[in-house]
């Protein structure tokens, strides 16, 4: 009865990891050979792992990645310009700590989104908050937020994100007002967050995409000067779909 009450209290206090560890210890006879401090230390370790695992799951879910990818699954054999040295440098998440940026460019199908999501998941595993957006949907959300009065809430959310991923930059025609909104968000994030952009277009063509040269200069200045550049090349890695007979 006492054991059951202990389990109930642990769950009531949301110490689920410790409860699981306590239950496991009760079923293992060899645990009787350990001291109280050793057994208690094992329970604390299990609670810690449980809490960290749950927090990681929450960060990955909130990031809303388009693809569930991880750095360990990256393919360096395909000739597309993916360099292990660059990925090793980025996998430590030091660039997040120093509020640096990453710009991934290359033609369609070269794996830009996969690499962006893999880096993003690695950042989540290191304890940082990540937000993934397809550029078209981000600009649509910015436009709608002005209509429904939620722009301040959305901009504050983006400002607090440790890593903001914007995928497929330059694919859609965007009004100048939305580019100004994005510039405001970059200003809010200056010195407090990192940004990752993927695009089919090299940065030298972004002026044409943005249109207004003043806004373009300001956006590029905040993104490019401290960015790690990954330039992919070669044919699409996507497998062609087989036609049904």
Image (cartoon, helix red, strand yellow):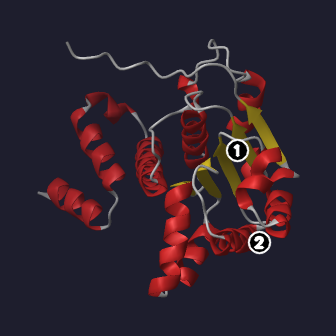
Residue lying at 53% horizontally and 21% vertically, measured from the top left: 237
Q: Quadrant of residue 193?
A: bottom right
Q: Determine which residue is flagged by label 2.
A: 187
Residue lying at 66% horizontally and 43% vertically, measured from the top left: 199
- Residue 100 vs residue 231, the one in the foreground: 231
Q: Position of residue 85 (x, y in %)?
A: 78, 25
Image quarter where the C terminus lies is top left
Evaluate if marks 1 and 2 touch, with contact meaning CB atoms under 8 Å apart.
Answer: no
Specify whether residue 92 is in view: no
Q: Quadrant of residue 195?
A: bottom right
Residue depth check, mark 1 versus mark 2: number of the one nearer the observer: 2
Mark 2, residues whose alpha carbon is within 10 Å: few (<14), some, or many (≥20)? some
Sequence-wise, which precedes: disc 1 or disc 2?
1
- For the residues labelled 1 and 2, the Cα–Cα distance comes to 22 Å
| Direction from residue 197 to residue 244 in the image, left or right | left
Q: Quadrant of residue 152?
A: bottom right
Image quarter where the N terminus lies is bottom left
Can you say whether 215 is above or below 103 in the image? below
Specify whether residue 240 is in view: yes
Q: Which mark is residue 93?
A: 1
């Amino acid at each position: 009865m006492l054991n059951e009450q202990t389990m109930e209290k642990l769950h009531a206090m949301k110490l689920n990891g410790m409860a699981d560890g306590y239950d496991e210890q009760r079923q293992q006879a060899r645990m009787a050979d350990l001291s109280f401090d050793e057994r208690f230390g094992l329970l604390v370790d299990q609670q810690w792992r449980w809490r960290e695992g749950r927090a990681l799951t929450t960060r990955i879910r909130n990031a809303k990645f388009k693809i569930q990818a991880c750095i360990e699954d990256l393919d360096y054999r395909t000739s597309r310009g993916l360099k292990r040295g660059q990925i090793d440098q980025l996998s430590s998440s030091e660039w997040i700590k120093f509020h640096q940026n990453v710009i991934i460019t290359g033609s369609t199908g070269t794996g830009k989104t996969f690499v962006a999501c893999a880096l993003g998941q690695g950042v989540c595993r290191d304890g940082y908050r990540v937000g993934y957006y397809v550029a078209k949907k981000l600009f649509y959300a910015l436009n709608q937020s002005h209509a429904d009065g939620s722009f301040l809430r959305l901009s504050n959310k983006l400002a607090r994100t440790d890593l903001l991923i914007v995928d497929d930059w330059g694919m859609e025609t965007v009004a100048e007002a939305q580019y100004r909104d994005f510039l405001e968000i970059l200003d809010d994030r200056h010195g407090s967050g990192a940004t990752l952009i993927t695009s089919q277009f090299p940065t030298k063509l972004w002026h044409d995409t943005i249109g207004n040269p003043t806004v373009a200069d300001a956006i590029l200045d905040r993104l490019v000067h401290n960015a790690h550049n990954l330039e992919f090349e070669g044919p699409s890695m996507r497998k062609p779909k087989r036609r049904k007979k």
